[in-house]
């Protein structure tokens, strides 16, 4: 029985977030340039978006480019930006056909104009799609997001729009880029690295974490379903005891 067949429909996570890692190492193993790995990684993006849609996942967030990724060699940054634009262009019809809505989180002010324009245009054109919400984290980092939220809250206090006493989890959440998105129940990271790399640190407070040694370009639909199966076999207690849950 495949992992897909074993899935329990009533216990699907609403939101799965993915740290797509290992493109560079995948290319290096084959004696190729890193961008070759990123291109292969785009094929995996296509497969996993399809896999998520097939089983009815509502939100899929992919960590495509972190704030820290700007420090990579200029060649690689430029190639990644070009790859993003060409992928959004080439996948546009598939997004429409599959009723996928594209959203982004991150500091879009930092990305080149051409990329920014294409993304905003695609977000706008897919805004009425009611299927899977595909969220691309681009020029994103949690610390950037949290500092930004604090600044904006401070500004609202200065303007007397909110009181310090009003600050709680719910209010803070409203100032994050993910305010309209539920927290992910499951976070997957590929490539055998066991870290969170500044990704959704506030939002994953109670997420289940799943790490696999597979490099992103070799991550298949069944690997995605295996991660969800693993999630479905866990007991989520949210700080309570096992007895309280049952
Ligand atoms: C991590 O591998 C991957 C990235 C930093 C970029 C991911 C981007 C894509 C898959 C392409 C575009 C994405 C979309 C959503 C269209 P790495 O370079 O850190 O690999 P390494 O750790 O082996 O060096």
Image (cartoon, rainbow, N blue to C red):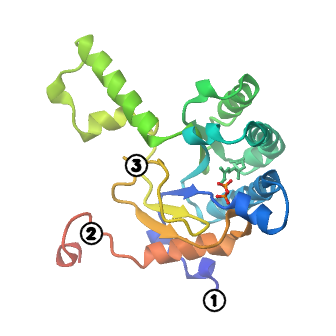
Residue 170 visible somewhere in the drawing: yes
Question: Residue lying farthest top?
Answer: 159
Q: Earlier in the sequence, mark 2 or mark 1?
A: 1
Q: Left or right: 207 with respect to 102?
A: left
Q: Earlier in the sequence, mark 1 or mark 3?
A: 1
Pointer 2 and pointer 3: residues touching (CB < 8 Å)? no
Q: CA distance from mark 2 to mark 3?
A: 19 Å
Residue of label 3: 201
Disc on res. 1: 1
Circle 3 packing at 10 Å, graded few (<14), some (14-19), many (20+), is some
Q: Left or right: 38 with respect to 131?
A: right
- The residue tagged with tag 2: helix, strand or loop? loop
Disc on res. 226: none
Residue of label 2: 237
In percent of width and height, residue 29 lies at 78, 68
- The residue tagged with tag 3: helix, strand or loop? loop
Kindly report which numbered mark, 2 or 3, lies closer to the viewer in this rendering: 3
Q: Is mark 2 within 8 Å of ligand 1?
A: no
């Amino acid at each position: 029985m495949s992992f897909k067949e074993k899935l329990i429909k009533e216990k699907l996570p609403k939101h799965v977030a993915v740290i797509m890692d290992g493109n560079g190492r995948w290319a290096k193993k084959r004696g190729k340039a890193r961008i070759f790995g990123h291109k292969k990684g785009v094929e995996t993006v296509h497969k996993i978006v399809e896999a998520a849609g097939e089983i009815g996942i509502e939100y899929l967030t992919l960590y495509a480019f972190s704030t820290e990724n700007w420090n990579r060699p200029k060649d690689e940054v430029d190639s990644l930006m070009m790859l993003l634009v060409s992928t959004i262009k080439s996948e546009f019809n598939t997004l429409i056909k599959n009723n996928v809505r594209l959203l982004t989180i991150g500091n879009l002010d930092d990305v080149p104009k051409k990329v920014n324009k294409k993304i905003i245009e695609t977000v706008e054109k897919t805004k009425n799609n009611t299927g899977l919400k595909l969220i691309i984290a681009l020029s994103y980092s949690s610390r950037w997001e949290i500092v930004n939220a604090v600044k904006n809250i401070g500004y609202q206090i200065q303007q007397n729009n909110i009181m310090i006493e009003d600050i709680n989890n719910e209010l803070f959440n409203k100032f994050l880029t993910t305010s309209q998105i539920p927290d992910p129940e499951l976070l997957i990271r590929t490539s055998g690295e066991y870290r969170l790399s500044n990704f959704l640190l506030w939002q994953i407070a109670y997420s289940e974490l799943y790490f696999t040694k597979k490099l992103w370009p070799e991550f298949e639909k069944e690997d995605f379903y295996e991660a969800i199966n693993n999630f479905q076999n866990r007991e989520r207690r949210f700080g309570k005891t096992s007895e309280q849950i049952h």
